[in-house]
């Protein structure tokens, strides 16, 4: 804990977090411009406080992760990356590729008559005024899967083993225990916080909507996140920084950066744009960090997939969205 609190990156992050919240209060002046029907009736103060509340819960999860993994041998993730010169070149190339891939999604979506494609389809977590169509969801998932998962995986898998890409478990028993515990805590938290969740579905909707939501989000955002950030970039971040804390912070920042244009974002004015970008950072920085912690402590990127992504939130919260899109009565 002392090492964390003394880390310059952590201190800068805390300062920027406070400044971001102050900026939100100054810019918003009592209301937010986002298209988020699920929280539209939630008081402004609660909406502003929500990212910080979520971050506190993530800190609790981090403590749980360290507790569960305290007796296992922690894999040397940095040793899985190439030498620093190659790691730096690959990191820059992957980040540039990811940025171009995002720009491609922003262009492709409107070109087809849809909203810009991001790591989330419009309506994820918070709903949206205009529900995406089935074709839009399918093209979004396919685009993200090919660009951010398949292509990077094929390129790097030719050069590195599955272990070097954090895709192999060194302790399946502990990995499974960690997944079950983290998933249980996170699921309970999300069911408590989000009213429109999987419990609102009928048995038939649950039977059809849950696996449908799991499959579409698994292809469209879970696999791209795992391959691009936690299989490829995370070992290189650790190699370049030599610090697990810095690596977790960079993982959180990268994850937030892959959600720059969300379905609920508003870019109608400089004020709306600033608020949208701030809330993306506040909303996704923490989840990106806990994914990094899970991967660093286990050496297995699959752990975060099932503990903190594919099911919670994308089944727990987003199954009702898929039920609505596909008209499951």
Image: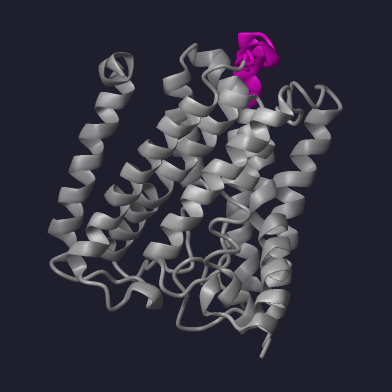
Left or right, residue 126 beside residue 215: left
Give the quarter of the image for residue 86. top right
- Looking at the picture, the colour scheme in use is one colour
**Is residue 102 rendered to the left or right of residue 268?**
right
Q: Is residue 204 above or below residue 145?
A: below
Q: Quadrant of the C terminus?
A: bottom right
The answer to whether any part of residue 307 appears in the image is: yes
Q: Say if 45 sits above or below 38 in the image.
A: above
State the image coordinates of residue 241 (x, y, percent, origin top left): 48, 15
| 74 to the left or right of 259 | right
Q: Nearer the viewer, residue 291 or 298?
A: 298
User: Is residue 35 visible in the rendered structure shown here?
Assistant: no
Q: Is residue 47 magenta?
A: no
On whether residue 89 falls in the magenta region, the answer is yes
- Quarter of the image for residue 318 reads bottom right
Residue 44, x across and y down, in percent: 20, 68
Which residue reaches farthest right?
A: 158
Nearer-the-camera pick, 128 or 329: 329
Q: How many marks?
A: 0
> Which residue is painted at 46% across and 77% down in the image?
128
Q: Quadrant of the N terminus?
A: top left
Q: Residue at x 24, y 33 (%)?
A: 14
Q: Residue at x 43, y 69 (%)?
A: 264
Q: Which residues are magenta?
A: 73-91
Q: Nearer the viewer, residue 192 or 7?
A: 192
Q: Residue at x 73, y 76 (%)?
A: 208
Hey, which quadrant is residue 205 in on the image? bottom right
Give how far across and how far down residue 215 sits, in percent: 73, 62
Q: Position of residue 98 (x, y in %)?
A: 61, 42
69 relative position to 232: left or right: left
Q: Is 212 drawn above or below residue 205 in the view shown?
A: above
């Amino acid at each position: 804990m002392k090492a964390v609190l003394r880390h310059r990156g952590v201190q800068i992050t805390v300062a920027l977090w406070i400044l971001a919240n102050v900026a939100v209060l100054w810019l918003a002046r009592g209301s937010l411009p986002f298209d988020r029907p699920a929280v539209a009736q939630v008081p402004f103060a609660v909406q502003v406080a929500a990212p910080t509340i979520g971050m506190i819960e993530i800190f609790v999860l981090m403590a749980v992760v360290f507790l569960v993994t305290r007796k296992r041998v922690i894999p040397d993730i940095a040793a899985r990356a190439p030498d620093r010169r190659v790691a730096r070149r690959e990191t820059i190339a992957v980040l540039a590729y990811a940025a171009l891939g995002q720009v491609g999604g922003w262009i492709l979506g409107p070109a087809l008559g849809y909203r810009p494609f991001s790591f989330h389809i419009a309506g994820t977590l918070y709903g949206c005024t205009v529900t995406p169509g089935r074709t839009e969801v399918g093209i979004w998932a396919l685009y993200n899967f090919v660009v951010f998962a398949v292509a990077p995986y094929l390129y790097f898998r030719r050069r590195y083993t599955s272990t070097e890409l954090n895709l192999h478990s060194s302790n399946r028993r502990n990995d499974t225990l960690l997944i079950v515990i983290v998933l249980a805590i996170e699921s309970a938290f999300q069911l408590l916080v989000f009213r429109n969740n999987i419990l609102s579905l009928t048995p038939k909707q649950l039977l059809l909507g849950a696996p449908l939501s799991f499959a579409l989000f698994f292809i469209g955002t879970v696999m791209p996140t795992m391959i691009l950030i936690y299989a490829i970039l995370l070992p290189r971040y650790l190699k370049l920084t030599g610090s697990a804390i810095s690596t977790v912070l960079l993982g959180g920042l990268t994850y937030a950066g892959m959600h720059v244009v969300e379905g609920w974002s508003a870019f109608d004015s400089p004020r709306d744009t600033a608020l949208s970008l701030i809330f993306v950072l506040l909303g996704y920085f923490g989840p990106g960090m806990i994914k990094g912690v899970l991967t660093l402590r286990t050496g297995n990127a699959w752990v975060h997939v099932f503990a903190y992504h594919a099911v919670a939130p994308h089944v727990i919260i987003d199954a009702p969205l898929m039920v609505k899109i596909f008209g499951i009565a």
